[in-house]
Amino acid sequence: MSHDRFGQVGQSALDLLAVALRTRAGTVPELAALAVREEAVVRHDLAQLEAEGYVVLRGDHLRCAAPAAVVAEVVRRRADGLAGDLVAGLADLAEIVGRLPSLAEEWETANPGHPAWDVELFHGPEAVVDLWHARQAREVLRRTDVVLPDATGLFVADRAMQEVWHEASRGEGRHARVIASIADATHPDAQERLAQELAGGVQIRLLADPPSWFWVADATTVALPVVWGERWPTSVMAVRDRSVAAMADWLFERMWERAVPVHSGGAGWHALLALMSSGATLEAASRALGLSERTGRRRLSEAMSHYGVGSMLELGVAWATARPD
């Protein structure tokens, strides 16, 4: 069976969907008659369409969803799948690049003055911070995007280093963006540092569980943990290579789109649902947005009324289908 690019739906099912949309058939037997097909064949095709969200079946009763909303949801799922593939790719890359220094030594012995690749390694409890500042001291980084799953080591700022970091986020063509975890953003000890970063011009968004520490700067340099998935790695590397940086940049942008700005409680229920869809509890999501849990519950109630649903499961499905990204 051939499938189209909008999910696991064959051409026969798509043709049937066109008939259903055009005729607004309300039952399976009615649709079979209008499509001039055997009812068993129609049910088989409807099962495909229902699996992808194009139709809703309740017994013999049939309702078509808005095609644009369904396609948007399929695209979102495919993008999530690509992001997952890229996370795995970066993990493999970190392992491969981690072998490079020893191989590069052998290369340099035979080819002095011709390095195999521009890779720099830092080790130690402050490697995460030291690497960025070492790079910044040699070559001004104008745009730095950081995924920071564990920021506990940064709750208390080093003032001199913080000023350099803030300076990198100020001025035309510059920015510093950070994706942090909800747990860190809601930690009492992090609130002063969080306020300082926001005041310093750093853009901060939140995810429930960022996959690994890494950063990418100016579409040329990417920093990776030697062991992918570490939340605060003690062995890190910077790789200056545009193709590698492009992978990390694409992944960061997809994560940034899904993440929610910190303290964005005025954004209605969308920010709350976005955080909860990434795994946060109602309490944690509410705190991250600067809301009380009571206000968070009220936002959920408003969302249920808006979408005309009666359960959190139905709300999640309705909101995910309607969300703009």
Image (tube, helix red, strand yellow):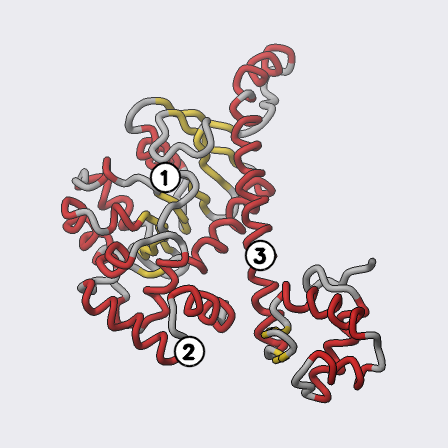
Near mark 1 (Cα within 10 A), the count class, few <14, some 14-19 or many ≥20, is some
Residue tagged 3: 79
Q: Residue at x 31, y 34 (%)?
A: 129
Where 253 falls versus 307 (above or below)? above
The answer to whether residue 155 is left or right of residue 120 is left
Residue 324 is situated, as x and y percent measured from the top left of the image, at: 49, 71
Q: Which quadrant: the N terminus?
A: bottom right
Q: CA distance from mark 2 to mark 1?
A: 48 Å
Q: Residue at x 38, y 80 (%)?
A: 306
Q: Nearer the viewer, mark 2 or mark 1?
A: 2
Pointer 2 or 1: first along the chain: 1
Residue 241 is situated, as x and y percent measured from the top left of the image, at: 56, 38
Residue 138 is situated, as x and y percent measured from the top left of the image, at: 39, 35
Q: Nearer the viewer, mark 3 or mark 2?
A: 2
The answer to whether residue 250 is left or right of residue 192 is right
Residue tagged 1: 136
Residue 59 is situated, as x and y percent measured from the top left of the image, at: 62, 74
The answer to whether residue 69 is left or right of residue 210 is right
Residue tagged 2: 307
Q: Nearer the viewer, mark 1 or mark 3?
A: 3
> Of the residues shown, which amino acid type is indicated by label 2?
Tyr
Task: Tell me, for residue 291, which label it has, or none.
Answer: none
Q: Helix or strand or loop: what does disc 1 sit on?
A: helix
